[in-house]
Image (cartoon, coloured by chain):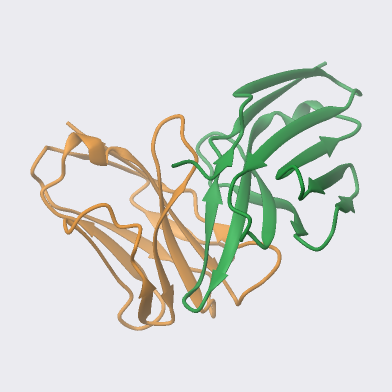
Amino acid sequence: GAGVSQSPRYKVAKRGQDVALRCDPISGHVSLFWYQQALGQGPEFLTYFQNEAQLDKSGLPSDRFFAERPEGSVSTLKIQRTQQEDSAVYLCASSADTTQRGYTFGSGTRLTVV
Amino acid sequence: DQQVKQNSPSLSVQEGRISILNCDYTNSMFDYFLWYKKYPAEGPTFLISISSIKDKNEDGRFTVFLNKSAKHLSLHIVPSQPGDSAVYFCAARTLSNSGYALNFGKGTSLLVTP
């Protein structure tokens, strides 16, 4: 597609529920990133993929968070046993390479845990 | 600890005047700095960037200035237009073997009034 597509746009989960957030990067983009943006904050790095390889997951806040990109294209961020502090906008971004023009973000998934 | 700081949460400027958005950072290993613009319910979009080896980069109405000794950068928008009203995020990059991640500030909300 023309841009980075994320689904769903909005997700309400009951505390303790598992959720899966999907990211379709720009076709052919090698690099894929997940960021978490809490209310009133800037995006914070979660994890980075180069093709199917997860090269950096240092930003994942706990072992309840898991990301995958099995075929080097679509990626899924899974959060197990959601908690209220997981409420945030989850942003996915992709880039063709180490470009100086930054990377392209999707519109995000707003997760609300009640 | 916040490595990229935007100390002004909001800024209001009259149309046609100059907007100056400021950003400070603490990590001297940052090699690249970027500004992103974000409208409500959309992902951040890349605006302009600057390498750490330069002190100025200009793109149309947007100019970014970098003062490495002060660990400070600023974004100038001139002339400001109502369509520039958005949240502006300053971001800084470090390059590692696993690719790169961006460290974002908390953002400055710019309002350009007619």
Residue A110 location, x and y as percent? 35, 41
Residue B107 location, x and y as percent? 58, 34
- The hue used for chain A is orange
Relative to residue A71, is residue A82 drawn left or right? left
Residue A77 location, x and y as percent? 29, 61
Q: Count the labels in the image.
A: 0
Please tell me in which quadrant of the rendered image residue B84 appears. top right
Q: Residue at x 56, y 62 (%)?
A: A3
Q: Is residue A1 visible?
A: no
- Is residue B36 depicted above or below A78 in this figure? above
Q: Nearer the viewer, residue A62 or B112?
A: A62
Q: Is residue B78 visible?
A: yes
- The hue used for chain B is green
Q: Nearer the viewer, residue A108 or B5?
A: B5
- Is residue A32 depicted above or below A11 in this figure? below
Relative to residue B16, is residue A9 drawn left or right? left
Relative to residue B17, is residue B88 drawn left or right? left
Pick the quarter of the image with the C terminus of chain B: top right
Q: Residue at x 84, y 35 (%)?
A: B77
Q: Residue at x 50, y 40 (%)?
A: A42
Pick the quarter of the image with the N terminus of chain B: top left
Q: Residue at x 78, y 39 (%)?
A: B75
Residue B26 location, x and y as percent? 59, 46
